[in-house]
């Protein structure tokens, strides 16, 4: 999966969020019970749709009406919605189920979509992880992200961008670690005192990953308002506390006052003074 | 095991000991060596494979891993017929670099390559290989602060070696030197890649619809990979079973991200998985394939993702040499002034005992690595 350059055409200051918006491949949005991520997902979907991309949404957790709520007509017309919420087990249709499950069906649709950048939003990836084997989902996500790089005919387009909403509390360290290793970027939502913040980790292949924490808010019309900078009360980043190398030593580097006095009053050998 | 004198396949039939009924000998055993094969002993016959050399300790045939510093730590190189397992660092930056060094060394030596991956197309991996350094003076490029001495010294060297200016430059690469240096900032030239023989295995392309697999058997991806490797070894004659094809070359097998969910294995996803023995069975069968052929294998594995620690212990036991990489990115050690000169630690977790009773371990256990602009170096970590 190749990352593209941050060709977002936004204003000068280059924030990680801007490069996340331009990044292709798998982008994980990790939310939690306190800080929900669906509104951020909808804001990114709106941005992609207004940017002229084809947007496919796989809706599993909320109904289509609820998902489309808040989008204006321009965005709604560009949105291709695959509804799994109403009939997840496909009981109403008597035809055969497509191979590869819902992600396989999505891949087929994307292949037929034609040229141009494509964004796929999974709402939510947690729903799929709870019902399908994790290894199969990882393989399908990689296949989704890769296919546009080698289409059947015509010039090689950009890889598909997959936005996956992942609920943090639902999964153990195994699936989270497996998906992290596949993702191009991870956006972890948290916040302090009413202000939502996003911690973004960008993994570019063959380069060091980069971290950033931003404050943001979602306006009522689902546009993203980036306030930049770390939140007002920065919680200590668990990754990087400044480490003092003199902690946890088995020997003592410092002298107490009494020890220093004793050391100063010591007479050195071979010093011939009047006392001796 | 492709050892010096006891390998019956592939290198020619040179049995080392025969019972001799001669009364002149003190013992009944007589080494059938120099007399039978004329002037060349089996020693020089093995050396004739490009890019290999016998170990100075026990005559084991070795290939270079592509990184001379790592060769030294492993006791001279990677033994032919064995597996080197690289435990990936968290973001898979440095382990993929070591993987590429191994493949690049194979191309420079003219070995046949087999590259298997479930994440990247092998053709893309080959495009990213580092470029070899052509001159024998290549080591001088790394001393970036010795520029003043460099020019005068190189002038002297040029005077002594003036004859060698006339030889074509390519000859310096295919010199019999074991282990080459590579420039990470440049890519390997396209002619070299095209001149080499590479078999690629990209799992998403090879997999058809997933069949129903009964429990306790290998994952679909592993079965396909083993069949592919076995086919290549048999058809190209690396195991000596085909009398028509006298293969005098080494097959370098590189497998990337083994054990990750992209191969269909879920040991990274759950702790109690259904096919927990799939990976260990794969390594066992692979080792059998390697021991009976002229090949060497490097596997990178994301062991930090494996949930069940017992599997990591089993995998370590089933591999011959195990090297672990621990990078400081994102960990608390990144800001620790003790580690500021280095990018990570390298742990030599296991060295094999091949035809030996003792290990070939170096005394130093405290090793750190650093990726400079052009070179990956491994150094002994200096304590404060």
Image: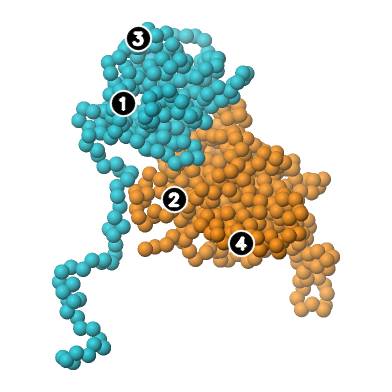
Chain colours: A cyan, B orange
What is the C-alpha distance between the residues marked 1 and 4? 57 Å
Q: Identify the secondary structure beneath mark 4.
A: helix
The residue beneath circle 2 is B343
Say few, some or many: other residues with alpha carbon within 10 Å of mark 3 (under 14 / 14 to 19 / 20 or more). few
Q: Nearer the viewer, mark 4 or mark 3?
A: 4
Chain to which the residue tagged by mark 4 belongs:
B
User: Alpha-carbon distance for marks 4 and 3?
Assistant: 73 Å
Are tags 2 and 1 found on a single chain? no
**Nearer to us in this view, B275 or A190:** A190
Q: CA distance from mark 3 to mark 2?
A: 49 Å
Instruction: Please tell me in which quadrant of the rendered image residue B357 appears.
Output: bottom right
**Circles 2 and 1: CB distance less than 8 Å?**
no
Q: Mark 3 falls within which chain?
A: A
Q: Residues under labels 3 and 1: Cα distance?
A: 21 Å
Q: Identify the residue at image location x=81%, y=64%.
A: B40
Crowding at dot 2, Cα within 10 Å, few <14 / some 14-19 / many 20+, comes out as some
Q: Is residue A117 left or right of A228 when viewed as pictured? A: right
Disc on the earlier residue, 3 or 1: 3
- Under circle 2, the secondary element is loop
The residue identified by callout 3 is A72
The residue that label 1 is drawn on is: A226
Q: Nearer the viewer, residue B167 or B217?
A: B167
Question: On the rendered image, what quadrant is the C terminus of chain A found in?
Answer: bottom left
Which of pointers 1 and 4 indicates the residue nearer the eye? 4
Q: CA distance from mark 2 to mark 4?
A: 33 Å
Residue A235, above or below B338 = above
Frontmost of labels 2 and 4 is 4
Residue A107 in the image, given as x and y percentages of width and height? 52, 20
- For residue B165, which quarter of the picture? bottom right
Q: Which residue is mark 4?
A: B152
Q: Are marks 2 and 4 in contact (CB under 8 Å)?
A: no
């Amino acid at each position: 999966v190749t990352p593209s350059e941050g060709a977002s055409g936004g204003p000068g200051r280059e924030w990680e969020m801007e490069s996340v918006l331009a990044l292709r491949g798998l982008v994980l949005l990790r939310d939690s019970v306190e800080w929900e991520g669906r509104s951020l997902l909808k804001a990114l979907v709106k941005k992609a749709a207004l940017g002229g991309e084809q947007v496919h949404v796989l809706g599993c957790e909320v109904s289509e009406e609820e998902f489309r709520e808040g989008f204006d007509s321009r965005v709604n017309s560009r949105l291709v919605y695959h509804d799994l919420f109403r009939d997840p087990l496909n009981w109403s249709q008597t035809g055969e189920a497509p191979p590869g499950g819902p992600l396989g069906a999505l891949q087929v649709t994307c292949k037929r979509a034609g040229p141009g950048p494509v964004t796929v939003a999974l709402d939510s990836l947690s729903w799929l992880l709870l019902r399908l084997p994790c290894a199969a989902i990882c393989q399908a996500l990689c296949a989704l992200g890769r296919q546009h790089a080698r289409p059947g005919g015509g010039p090689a387009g950009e890889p598909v961008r997959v936005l996956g909403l992942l609920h943090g509390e639902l999964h153990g360290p195994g699936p989270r670690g497996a998906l992290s290793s596949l993702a191009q970027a991870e956006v972890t939502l948290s916040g302090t005192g009413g202000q939502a913040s996003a911690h973004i980790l960008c993994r570019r292949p063959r380069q060091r990953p980069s971290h950033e924490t931003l404050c943001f808010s979602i306006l009522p019309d689902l546009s993203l308002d980036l306030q930049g900078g770390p939140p007002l009360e920065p919680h200590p980043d668990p990754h990087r506390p400044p480490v003092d190398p003199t902690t946890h030593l088995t020997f003592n580097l410092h002298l107490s006052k009494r020890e220093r006095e004793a050391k100063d009053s010591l007479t050195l050998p071979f010093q011939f003074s009047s006392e001796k | 095991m492709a050892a010096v004198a006891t390998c019956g396949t592939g290198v020619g039939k040179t049995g080392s000991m025969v019972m001799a009924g001669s009364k002149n000998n003190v013992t009944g055993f007589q080494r059938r060596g120099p007399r039978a094969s004329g002037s060349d002993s089996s020693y020089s016959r093995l050396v004739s494979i490009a890019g290999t050399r016998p170990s100075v300790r026990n005559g084991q045939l070795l290939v270079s891993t592509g990184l001379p510093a790592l060769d030294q730590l492993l006791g001279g190189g990677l033994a032919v017929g064995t597996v080197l397992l690289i435990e990936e660092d968290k973001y898979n930056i440095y382990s993929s670099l070591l993987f590429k060094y191994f493949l690049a060394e194979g191309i420079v030596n003219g070995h046949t390559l087999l590259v298997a991956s479930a994440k990247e197309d092998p053709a893309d991996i080959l495009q990213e290989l580092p470029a070899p350094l052509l001159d024998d003076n290549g080591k001088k490029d790394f001393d970036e602060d010795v520029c003043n001495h460099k020019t005068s010294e190189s002038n002297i060297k040029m005077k002594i070696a003036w004859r060698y200016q006339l030889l074509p430059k390519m000859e310096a690469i295919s010199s019999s030197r074991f282990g080459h240096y590579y420039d990470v900032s440049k890519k390997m030239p396209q002619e070299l890649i095209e001149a080499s023989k590479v078999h690629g295995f990209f799992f998403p392309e090879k997999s058809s619809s997933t069949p129903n697999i009964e429990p306790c058997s290998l994952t679909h991806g592993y079965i396909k990979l083993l069949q592919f490797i076995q086919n290549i070894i048999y058809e190209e004659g690396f195991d000596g079973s085909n009398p028509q094809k006298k293969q005098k070359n080494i097959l370098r097998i590189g497998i990337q991200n083994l054990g990750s969910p992209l191969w269909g294995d879920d040991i990274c996803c759950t702790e109690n998985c259904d096919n927990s023995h799939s990976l260990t069975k794969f390594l066992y069968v692979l080792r059998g394939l390697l021991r009976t052929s002229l090949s060497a294998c490097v596997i990178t594995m994301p062991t930090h993702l494996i949930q069940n620690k017992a599997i990591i212990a089993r995998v370590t036991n089933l591999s011959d040499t195990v090297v672990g990489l621990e990078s400081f990115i994102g960990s608390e050690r990144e800001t620790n002034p003790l580690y500021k000169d280095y990018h990570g630690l390298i742990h030599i977790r296991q060295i094999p005992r091949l035809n030996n009773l003792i290990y070939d371990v170096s005394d130093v256990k405290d090793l750190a690595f650093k990726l400079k602009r052009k070179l990956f170096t491994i150094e002994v970590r200096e304590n404060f």
